Image: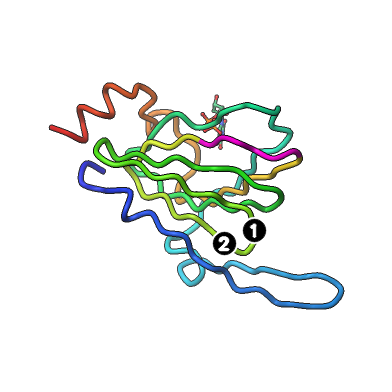
Amino acid sequence: MKDSTIYNCNVFELPKIHNQSGNITALNNLLDVPFEVKRVYYLYDIPGGETRGGHAHYDLHQFLIAASGSFDVILDDGKNKKIVHLDRPYFGLEIVPGIWRELLNFSSGAICLVLASHKYEEKDYIRNYNSFFEMKNK
Ligand code: TYD
């Protein structure tokens, strides 16, 4: 968690089964997603102008997909920041543990699909930016 950087967070192009009647993307544990998925959740009905996230995790790996619409993800490792724009359902952003993230600029009707390596545990969250910054820069 302490040594992870934004450069460990990469966008993966996902397999797409193309069909005239529509496309399919199938994700297999440890094959298309770089960790074992224990939980799937999605953000939807996000009001215009809203920001989500605003925290880091000690152990959780996540994989974010713009299943519909688009949004931006700001990644911050306490030293460097980068912005990733997700706008296709066949791209996935891996977020490793120890990265502060904010999700913003959601388009109307956007759906953020999240694959996660662990079940929900509040004690895995770091919700105070100053504590996060100190941990990363100790
Ligand atoms: P949080 O992860 O802080 O939301 P976001 O990062 O999208 O802004 O979660 C918001 C609330 O939802 C928080 O009270 C915890 C709850 N929650 C669950 O109960 N289970 C879950 O799997 C998730 C992701 C959140």
Quadrant of ligand 1: it is top right
Category of crowding for the residue at label 2, using alpha-carbon neighbours closer than 10 angstroms: few (below 14), some (14–19), many (at least 20) = many
Category of crowding for the residue at label 1, using alpha-carbon neighbours closer than 10 angstroms: few (below 14), some (14–19), many (at least 20) = some
Task: Decide if residue 123 is on the left or right side of residue 26.
Answer: left
Residue plotted at (54% across, 43% down) = 72
Residue 104 in magenta?
A: yes
Residue 93 in magenta?
A: no
Q: Which label sits on residue 42? A: none
Task: Decide if residue 23 is on the left or right side of residue 128.
Answer: right
Residue 18: quarter of image = bottom right
Residue plotted at (80% across, 78% down) = 19
Q: Residue furthest left?
A: 138
x and y, in percent, of residue 89 in the image:
65, 59
Magenta: main secondary structure equals loop
x and y, in percent, of residue 105 in the image:
60, 36
**Of 40 and 103, which appears nearest the observer?**
103
Q: Is residue 130 above or below residue 108?
A: above
Q: Secondary structure beneath disc 1?
A: loop
Residue plotted at (46% across, 49% down) = 62
x and y, in percent, of residue 32 in the image:
51, 69
| Kind of residue indicated by mark 2 | Phe
Q: How many numbered callouts?
A: 2
Q: Report which residue position mark 2 lands on.
A: 91
Write the start and end of the magenta stretch as one range: 103-108
Q: Do the residues labelled 1 and 2 touch (CB within 8 Å)?
A: yes
Question: Is the residue indicated by label 2 positioned so its CB lies within 8 Å of ligand 1?
Answer: no
Q: The N terminus is located in which quarter?
A: top left
| Kind of residue indicated by mark 1 | Arg
Q: Which label sits on residue 88? A: 1
